[in-house]
Image: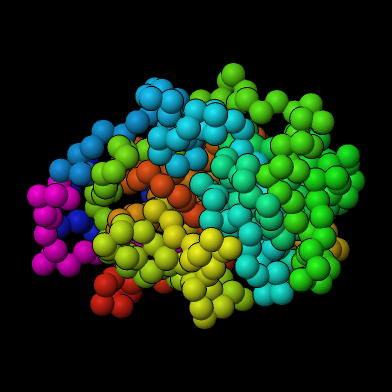
């Protein structure tokens, strides 16, 4: 895409919903009675300084044509990963990934295996705690993955978007019916329990782990296919590997605070690497292989309620919504639309075009729409830009 020297003022965020069209909304669940109704769409007005100009390099890289999902070509034993868009060994890239639930309780840190995730979903569970679903394709040599925690309904939908095998240690009552639609490795209620072990350096429930070897063994024992479904055509659109695609009509995003109140995460852009370093709990967010770094960030707002008479959250990830796409030190507002109950979620720019991600890892934050105002995006000088 061609960068403009000055991005225009953004119109109402609500217009993004109109661009994406009307969606079906979340299928009804007879056991769920949301007590928090959908929040009204906020107004998003953002400008870019008139002093901002586009370099020749930015213009060149922004013009890179994106690869359509499914347009994968094998070259020298490698093929494009569905998760990251990077050229990856065929045996790994053509194998279904795992979608594993991970704890973010302080007592469970660090998360093991999370640095290998091509895509991570962060979403709240009970109270104000967040939990992760890590989508991982390269896990064979990992001897410790987790700690593994229980599943919630909305995470089952995330797993379907990647044709992934779900891995978890238990689940809420409300998630249980949805797991029947998944190839599932469960440490408690199905024959997947041999894949897990308890470590001695953590206390229960923070010490349930699995490994690459255990997962491969149990997946074979349960008879799950490790090949993508023939109908699966990918998810994201990626630019060319090694080149930076900058979305047009952007504003600066060097520091990103999603607005979660408990772990208080932050993404800090490192311009020399083109990566966002993640922080939480006031310190670098470390996995077992170092600080977490991602190429793309998606903030997705969703209405949140509760299952009747319980503390379990009912997050509606089906309703047409809104958010931000952040990459290369820039951010743009996006509209959000999901393909049916179990299809992929798509993100569209102001022109109604599906966004192009840069090759690399992506972190997706699912945020209660009523907390939209808590999100802060700053430029390189620390000035808020998302207002």
Identified at 58% across, 20% down, the residue is 231
Identified at 15% across, 46% down, the residue is 59
Give the percent coordinates (x, y) of residue 222: 82, 31
The reply to whether residue 370 is visible in this rendering is yes
48 part of magenta stretch: yes
Give the percent coordinates (x, y) of residue 189: 90, 46
Number of numbered discs visible in the structure rendering: 0
Of residue 41 and residue 367, the one placed in the foreground of this image is: 367
Of residue 62 and residue 360, the one placed in the foreground of this image is: 360
Report the side of 58 relative to 98 (left or right).
left
Give the percent coordinates (x, y) of residue 223: 79, 26
Residue 86, quarter of picture: top left
Identified at 81% across, 72% down, the residue is 203
Q: Magenta residues? A: 42-59
Identified at 81% across, 51% down, the residue is 196
Work out whether 250 lies above or below 140: below
Report the side of 22 relative to 14 (left or right).
right
Work out whether 80 lies above or below 142: above
Of residue 7 and residue 243, the one placed in the foreground of this image is: 243
């Amino acid at each position: 895409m061609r960068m403009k020297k000055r991005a225009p003022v953004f119109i109402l965020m609500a217009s993004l919903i109109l661009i994406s069209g009307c969606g079906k909304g979340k299928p009804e669940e007879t056991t769920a009675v949301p007590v928090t109704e959908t929040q009204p769409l906020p107004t998003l007005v953002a400008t870019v300084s008139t002093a901002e100009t586009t370099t020749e390099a930015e213009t060149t890289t922004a013009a890179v044509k994106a690869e359509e999902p499914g347009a994968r070509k094998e070259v020298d034993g490698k093929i494009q990963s569905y998760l990251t868009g990077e050229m990856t060994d065929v045996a790994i890239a053509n194998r279904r990934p795992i979608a594993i639930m991970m704890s973010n309780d302080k007592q469970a840190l660090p998360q093991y295996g999370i640095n290998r995730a091509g895509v991570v979903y962060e979403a709240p569970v009970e109270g104000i705690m967040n939990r992760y679903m890590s989508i991982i394709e390269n896990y064979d040599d990992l001897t410790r993955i987790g700690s593994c925690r229980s599943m919630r309904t909305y995470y089952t939908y995330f797993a379907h978007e990647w044709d992934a095998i779900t891995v978890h240690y238990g689940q809420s009552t409300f998630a249980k019916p949805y797991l029947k639609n998944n190839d599932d490795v469960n440490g408690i209620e199905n024959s997947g329990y041999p894949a897990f072990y308890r470590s001695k350096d953590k206390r229960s429930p923070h010490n349930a782990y699995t490994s690459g070897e255990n997962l491969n063994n149990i997946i074979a024992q349960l008879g799950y296919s490790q090949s993508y479904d023939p109908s699966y055509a990918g998810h994201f659109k990626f630019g060319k590997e090694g080149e930076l695609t900058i979305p047009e009509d952007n504003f600066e995003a060097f520091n990103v605070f999603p607005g979660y109140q408990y772990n208080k995460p932050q993404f800090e852009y490192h311009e020399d690497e083109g990566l966002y370093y993640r922080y939480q709990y006031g310190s670098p967010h470390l996995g077992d292989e170092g600080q977490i770094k991602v190429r793309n960030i998606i903030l997705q707002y969703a209405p949140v309620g509760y299952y009747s008479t319980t503390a379990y959250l009912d997050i509606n990830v089906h309703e047409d919504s809104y958010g931000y796409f952040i990459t290369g030190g820039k951010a743009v507002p996006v509209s959000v639309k999901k393909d049916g109950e179990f299809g992929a979620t798509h993100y569209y720019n102001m022109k109604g075009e599906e966004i192009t991600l840069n090759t690399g890892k992506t972190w997706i934050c699912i945020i209660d729409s009523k907390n939209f105002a808590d999100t802060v995006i700053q430029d390189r000088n620390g000035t808020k830009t998302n207002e």
